Image (spheres, rainbow, N blue to C red):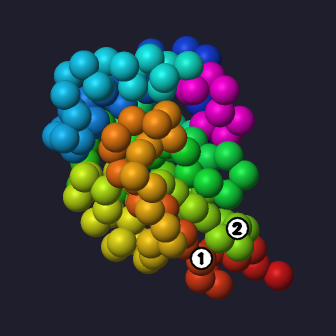
Amino acid sequence: MVWIRTAIDDDYSVLLAIWRRSVEATHTFLKPSDVDAIEQDVATYLPQMSDLRVAEVEGQPMGFIAIENDTVEMLFVDALAQGQGIGSALLESVLTGRQSIRVDVNEQNPSGRNFYAAKGFAEIGRSETDGEGRAFPILHLRLEPTQAHQPQS
């Protein structure tokens, strides 16, 4: 069973380790030096996220999602726990009540692209570089949640 909770300050180092294992497993286009550099950015961004949620399985953090406004800024699942519904549970936790939601995914990350496509996200744009200007193409995706995600009246 996956339990989603709000992140606390003590989570940041664990979430950063989850991020690294996830990226090393899925972002094979990155060199180790790229991962090291991006990790520094992620370490800075995590405490700044106003809505950061952690997925726990049997009391252990296994993934996290950060959303700002209607944009998923980060969604990562531990490499040891991928394919177990944790990413789906995290995404579902932020969908309720939203008219639409956006996410950027690395074009060279087929597992991320496939995950979002399976959830109904559609490509609405593409950038040649990531948000920090690095030469990693980004796909801009949007999901229009179904009525099932809308609050009940």
Q: Is residue 2 above or below residue 9?
A: below
Please give the label number shown on residue 118: none
Does any portion of residue 84 appear in the rendered image?
Answer: no
Q: Quadrant of residue 51?
A: top right
Number of numbered markers: 2
Per the image, is 47 magenta? yes
Kind of residue at badge 2? Arg
Disc 2 target residue: 98
Q: Position of residue 141 (x, y in %)?
A: 49, 66
**Which residue lies at the image location 36% right of the left edge and 72% below the top edge?**
117
For this view, does 30 lie left or right of residue 115?
Answer: left
Of 9 and 125, the residue lying toward us: 125
Kind of residue at badge 1? Pro
The residues bearing labels 2 and 1 have C-alpha atoms spaced at a distance of 7 Å
Q: Position of residue 99 (x, y in %)?
A: 71, 73
Which class describes the residues within 10 Å of circle 2: few (<14), some (14-19), or many (20+)? some
Q: Is residue 59 above or below residue 13?
A: below
Q: Position of residue 102 (x, y in %)?
A: 57, 62
Q: Quadrant of residue 98?
A: bottom right
**Magenta-tinted stretch:** 45-52
Disc 1 target residue: 145
Q: Position of residue 90 (x, y in %)?
A: 49, 52
Q: Are marks 2 and 1 in contact (CB under 8 Å)?
A: yes
**Which residue lies at the image location 76% right of the left edge and 79% below the top edge?**
152
Quarter in which the C terminus is drawn: bottom right
Of 121 and 130, the residue lying toward us: 130
- Secondary structure of the residue carrying numbered label 1: loop
